[in-house]
């Protein structure tokens, strides 16, 4: 069992250190992967927005669960912007301005991390206060890197 566990960890580490491109069988898969994770993120973020903006009743447990999904999804799309996977709504600048693109990713990860903390605080005001900055981090990346 212990041996199996350490093999599993080794395999997971090997997968993480693979170049991102090697993780997808074809460029269309990379595009679908990033769009899918962003879509799931937007669905759960939208549910938080509905609560933050008073369009849905505040539900502390649902808020925390939704925020967790948002933060988990926020980690995923980036591997899908791999070399040779241009297309979809991605602007070519993504592959030319790596530092700026990474900085936007980092900001989203930071804000979605804070969103989890805020949602777990268990009060609507905390959620409201962190919803805007998180949405702003989505928008900042879209403004620079997503085609209209
Ligand atoms: C959403 C969603 C986005 C962001 C963005 C924030 O709910 O789907 O892409 O928020 O609109 O400005």
Image (cartoon, rainbow, N blue to C red):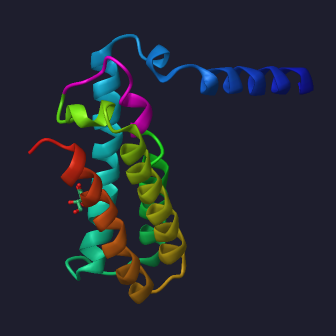
Magenta stretch: give its range.
77-87
Count of marks placed on residues = 0
Q: Is residue 66 above or below residue 30?
A: below
Q: Residue at x 19, y 78 (%)?
A: 55
Ligand 1 quadrant?
A: bottom left
| Camera-nearest residue between 41 and 61 | 41
Q: Looking at this rendering, what residue extends furthest in the left direction?
A: 148
Residue 104: x, y in percent?
38, 52
Horizontal arrangement in the rendering, residue 60 relative to residue 132 (left or right): right
Horizontal arrangement in the rendering, residue 67 relative to residue 86 (left or right): right
Horizontal arrangement in the rendering, residue 37 relative to residue 19 (left or right): left
Residue 117: x, y in percent?
54, 73
Using the rendered view, name the quadrant where residue 18 is placed. Answer: top right
Q: Is residue 129 above or below residue 4?
A: below
Quadrant containing the C terminus is top left
Residue 60: x, y in percent?
45, 77
Q: Is residue 104 above or below residue 135?
A: above
User: Magenta part mainly helix, strand or loop?
Assistant: loop
Q: Looking at this rendering, what residue extends furthest in the right direction?
A: 2
Quadrant containing the N terminus is top right
Q: Residue at x 42, y 17 (%)?
A: 24
Q: Residue at x 44, y 18 (%)?
A: 21
Residue 92: x, y in percent?
22, 31
Q: Residue at x 27, y 44 (%)?
A: 39
């Amino acid at each position: 069992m212990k041996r199996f566990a350490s093999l599993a960890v080794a395999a997971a580490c090997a997968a993480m250190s693979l170049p991102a491109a090697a993780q997808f069988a074809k460029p269309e898969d990379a595009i679908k992967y990033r769009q899918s994770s962003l879509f799931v993120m937007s669905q759960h973020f939208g549910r938080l927005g509905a609560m933050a903006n008073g369009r849905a009743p505040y539900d502390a447990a649902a808020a925390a669960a939704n925020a967790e999904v948002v933060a988990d999804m926020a980690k995923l799309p980036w591997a899908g912007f791999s070399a040779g996977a241009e297309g979809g709504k991605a602007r070519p600048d993504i592959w030319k301005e790596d530092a700026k693109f990474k900085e936007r990713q980092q900001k989203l990860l930071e804000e979605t991390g804070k969103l989890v903390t805020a949602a777990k605080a268990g009060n609507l005001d905390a959620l409201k206060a962190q919803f805007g900055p998180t949405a702003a981090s989505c928008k900042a990346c879209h403004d620079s890197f997503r085609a209209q």
